[in-house]
Image (cartoon, rainbow, N blue to C red):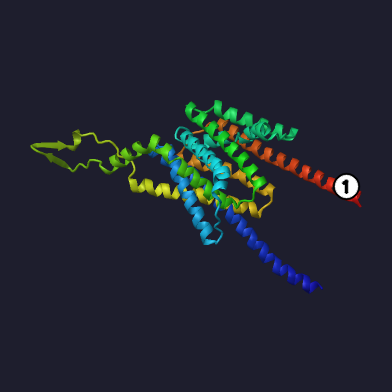
Amino acid sequence: MQNNENKIDNKVNPLLKRESLIIISLIFGWYVSSSVSNNLNKQILNNFSFPMTLAIVQLFQISLYSFLFLWMRNQFAFIGFSDIMKKVLPLGLFNFASHAFTYMSLANVPVSFMHTIKATSPIFTVILSFLILDERYGSLVIVSLLPIIFGVSLCTFTEVNINQYGLIMAIVSTILFVLQNIYSKSLFRKYKFNPVVLSMYTALCAFLCNIPLWLLTDGQSVLDFIYNQENQPIYLDNTVIGDNVINLDSVVVEDPGPSLSFLLTLFLLNGFAHWAQYITAFNTLNRVTPVTYAVSNTLKRVFVIVTSILYFHNTITFMNAFGILISISGVYFYTRAKQYYNQLNQRTKNEIDITSNVNRV
């Protein structure tokens, strides 16, 4: 008997170790891809000030990579035209708008500051869920919002040279992300969608529907930017034009900035990193408990903020750092409070079901 138990343990342990390694690898990939995506967003916007273009290119890449991922796994599924128009299209428009406002903010504020503002999403979730879905939250959830409000307020008021436009765009993008999540939640309650399939169609709808808007806003400016990059003047040691000699010492040449090939590489890496962030997050959620996912997600936000500060050499004060820490802690407590009430509601529901079954008997 003892030998049989040892044999079972020997079989189970390697499986547990393998699963643990997979989970650790997924979380690591999730953190790295999220950090790379956010930092590349900022780097692209520092050299290419067209947020709408970044949003629309990223949406196209997400739909393309999702299609290839599903096709390689033989999981591709068609969604009917009526379903796309009624269910997916509104989600796609939310998706594009939230991305566009995020990048408008990111073009004017540091990554760390923007992510601190995005930590306020639980506040807007509680308010909008009550107004739209008539969902009510317990006292623990409401109390958990206080450190978020305090931390973000502290970080905002102590931020050096805060950009008001960037702050407003960050708040608008956070509200739009919350509305998108509320709408997605209502969709998943009524219909069963593969998240990757839904992501592909959502990104594709957002991309196609916003091409006219892109043409009106960024289109001509982007074409001018590409033309100027391709036609930068080249000066040799002493360039002769007619009878005149241009002396380089007396000529001021504007910095042409990064080459088009370099920007294209950044766009490709950014799109893949953004898509990889979604896939690794989804797979992590499927393999771990909600509590583990909540902790991992909170630590991921800290990881993104810290790496962005190091990457861009941003200067933050002690009060900035303290505000970030408090707001992130508030997000964690909010998640745990919601899980507590969900478990409590599920337990109450099970007890009611048991009681009703007993009464029937």
Residue shown at the point (51%, 43%) measured from the top left? 307
Count up the numbered dots.
Answer: 1
Does 244 sit left or right of 130 as displayed? left
* Three-letter residue code for mark 1: Thr
Judging depth in this view, the residue of 182 and 241 nearest the camera is 182
Residue 335 point in image, percent of width and height: 68, 40
Q: Quadrant of residue 295?
A: top right
Between residues 14 and 176, which one lies in front from this camera angle? 176
Q: Is residue 36 visible?
A: no
Q: Position of residue 248 (x, y in %)?
A: 19, 37
Which quarter shows the N terminus? bottom right
Residue 199 in picture, x, y percent from top left:
55, 48
Q: Percent from the top left, x then y, of residue 130? A: 68, 32
Q: How many residues crowd around disc 1 within 10 Å: few (fewer than 14), some, or many (20 or more)?
A: few
Residue holding disc 1: 355
User: Furthest residue to the left?
Assistant: 243
State left or right for residue 29 relative to residue 104: right
Residue 180 in sight here: yes
SS state under label 1: helix
Q: Quadrant of residue 238?
A: top left
Residue at x-position 58% and y-position 35%: 324
